């Protein structure tokens, strides 16, 4: 294994679809990173995507710092078992042995139709070769999805000139004044809601909790609290594991992002942690419980008789017991399975259903009906509908161990990536929605709270939150609600367009009262939760 230093820089560009392309050095075969779903970014055959060997397209010097650039233009993130992208090198065009140069964690962007360029500044090994191969790989860990592979042919020679080989594709940016418009509108909207509901102080003492990390210290994280009024954060405890960081080796301990269950009766939060002794090809198998309000370590257990199938989502069920959802491979098909996971690591299968087709395999959210505590709902997205974001709600009776039904979600007007139970709401759920992903233009996304009928999939607007032209079309920001909402609000984090500014929004589904926090920045805070300990 070569010792390599690398810096990774993410560059966002227009959102289309595809999978993985190697831009610099230029990949073998055709290359088109501008058209949606272009087959030049969809190659699986080992070892190099099925493309024939070419003459070297670049010549580098031994030990040179080189800008390597690739594009992930379709995201296949697997909650509970994050994938990765990596670059590696082989010393000859016929070799099938590649040495890793750098690893980048698959980002959880909540919508597959996502395109992002990455640049890795890599110090090449101190070696010469007349014909080396650089390979870019995206292994999503997604059921039924083989790794995507691209290769480029290069030469490393002492006679090469050490120069910057990367040319960025620049686009005309908006003026600073234009970029400030959404933030000004957001502050004006906050002032409007403050004046309208100035006599109501229900949100004053509420805090959210989550895990924060520094991208320059990826192997550690902190448990923090966030005020829903001021947006201020407070560090409560530190952990020697990062978030979704499958880098392998001695630093491979990390928590699975967005796999969280809150037990308000015991005042604990449970997450899944990847074992430091395991490779990045193994799913998280440690049940890790902490104090919900201070982050103190409560209990750690291995999943008993672990079978290797990742747990994609957790939700509170009863005291010391959580609902768990898994996508279980079976021959050439899959089963959706729900079970229970206790804090001691015992997983018990309760119900499963074979998929009628291999389309609705994008796990998005797991939610327990907080009114009856019998039913569990899994929100599953359609793998082949990155624009329309069609989805289904799979309903299970966890108490009796039965699958009940699957309802097609009506996404003609509203799309969403999470849904939340609400006291006295029956089996209806609520979701925060920016409208449709297919809407184009910077001012098309008006945010609403919508009601979701879990029996028939009907989606109707419940409350207006923000008009167009203020907040991004971003499907993250979800808050795990726990088993109750005593203050009557559901919470979400909204991102202001063209800035790093965020607002926590609270909405009461019964009255449609809306509250905004002060402006804050929560871009590096993960798995936010609302904690309401039992009296």
Image (spheres, rainbow, N blue to C red):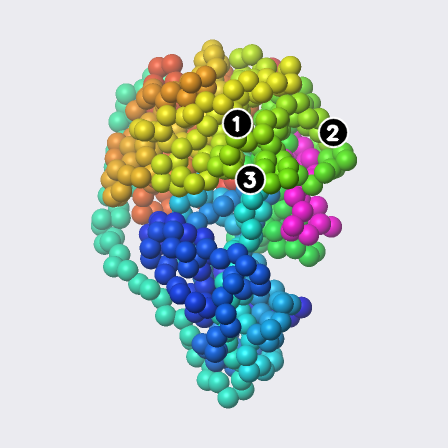
Task: Decide if residue 519 is on the left or right side of residue 236.
Answer: left
Asked if residue 282 lies in the magenta stretch, the reply is yes
Residue shown at 60% from the left, 32% from the top: 335
Q: Rate crowding at label 3 as few (under 14), some (14 to 19) or many (20 or more) other CA atoms within 10 Å.
A: many
Residue found at the very far bottom of the displayed protein = 159
- Residue 164, visible in the rendered structure: yes
Which residue position holds label 1? 378
Q: Residue shown at 68%/57% (left/top)?
A: 249
Residue 519 is inside the magenta segment: no
| Predominant SS of the magenta segment | loop
- Label 1 crowd (10 A; few <14 / some 14-19 / many >=20): many
Q: Position of residue 478 (x, y in %)?
A: 46, 33
First in residue order: circle 2 vs circle 3: 3
At which x and y percent is residue 495?
A: 37, 40
Q: Name the residue nearer the viewer: 171 or 508.
A: 171
- Compare residues 188 and 287 and report the one nearer the observer: 287
Q: Earlier in the sequence, mark 1 or mark 3?
A: 3
Marker disc for residue 100: none
Give residue 186's quadrant in the image: top left
To which residue does mark 3 refer?
79
Q: Which residue is mark 2?
A: 346
Please state, as top left, top right, bottom left or bottom right, where the C terminus lies in the image.
Answer: top right
Q: Element under label 1?
A: strand
Mark 2 vs mark 3, CA separation in Å? 20 Å
């Amino acid at each position: 294994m070569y010792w390599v230093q690398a810096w990774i820089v993410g560059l966002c560009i227009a959102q289309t679809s595809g999978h993985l392309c190697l831009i610099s050095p230029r990949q073998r075969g055709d290359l088109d990173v501008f058209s949606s779903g272009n087959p030049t970014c969809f190659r699986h055959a080992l070892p190099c995507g099925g493309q024939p060997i070419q003459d070297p397209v670049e010549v580098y010097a031994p030990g040179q710092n080189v800008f390597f650039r690739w594009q992930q233009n379709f995201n296949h993130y697997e909650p509970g078992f994050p994938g990765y992208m990596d670059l590696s090198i082989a010393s000859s065009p016929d070799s099938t042995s590649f040495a890793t140069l750098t690893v980048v964690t698959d980002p959880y962007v909540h919508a597959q139709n996502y395109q992002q360029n990455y640049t890795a500044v890599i110090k090449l090994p101190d070696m010469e070769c007349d014909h080396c191969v650089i390979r870019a790989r995206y292994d999503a860990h997604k059921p039924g999805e083989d790794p995507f592979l691209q290769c480029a042919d290069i030469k490393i020679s002492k006679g090469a000139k050490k120069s910057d080989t990367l040319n960025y594709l620049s686009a005309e940016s908006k003026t600073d004044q234009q970029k400030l418009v959404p933030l000004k509108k957001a502050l004006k909207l906050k002032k409007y809601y403050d004046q309208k509901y100035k006599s109501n102080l229900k949100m004053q003492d509420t805090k959210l909790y989550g895990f924060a990390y520094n991208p320059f210290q990826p192997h550690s994280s902190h448990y923090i609290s966030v005020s829903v009024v001021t947006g201020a954060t407070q560090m409560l405890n530190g952990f020697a594991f990062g978030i979704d960081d499958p880098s392998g080796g001695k630093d491979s301990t990390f928590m699975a992002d967005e796999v969280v269950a809150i037990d308000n009766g015991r005042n604990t939060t449970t997450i899944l942690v990847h074992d430091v002794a395991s490779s990045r090809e193994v799913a998280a198998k440690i049940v890790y419980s902490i104090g919900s309000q201070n982050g103190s370590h409560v209990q750690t257990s291995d999943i008993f008789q672990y079978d290797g199938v990742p747990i994609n989502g957790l939700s509170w069920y009863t005291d010391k017991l959580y609902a768990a959802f898994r996508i279980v491979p079976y021959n050439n098909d899959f089963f959706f399975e729900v079970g229970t996971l206790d804090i001691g690591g015992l997983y018990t299968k309760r119900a499963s259903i074979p998929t009628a087709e291999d389309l609705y395999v994008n796990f998005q959210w797991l939610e327990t009906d907080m009114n009856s505590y019998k039913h569990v709902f899994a929100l599953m997205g359609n793998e082949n509908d990155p624009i329309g974001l069609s989805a289904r709600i799979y309903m299970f009776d966890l108490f009796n161990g039965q699958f009940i039904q699957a309802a097609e979600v009506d996404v003609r007007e509203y799309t969403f990536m999470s849904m939340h139970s609400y006291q006295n709401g029956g089996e209806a759920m609520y979701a925060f929605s920016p409208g449709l992903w297919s809407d184009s233009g910077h001012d098309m996304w008006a945010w609403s709270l919508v009601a979701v009928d879990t029996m028939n999939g009907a989606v109707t607007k419940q409350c207006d939150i923000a008009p167009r032209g203020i907040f991004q079309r971003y499907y993250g920001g979800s808050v795990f609600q726990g088993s109750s909402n005593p203050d009557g609000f559901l919470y979400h984090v909204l991102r202001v367009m063209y800035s790093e500014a965020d607002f926590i929004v609270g909405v009461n589904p019964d009255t449609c009262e809306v509250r905004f926090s002060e402006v804050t920045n929560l871009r590096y805070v993960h798995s936010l939760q609302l904690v309401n300990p039992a009296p």
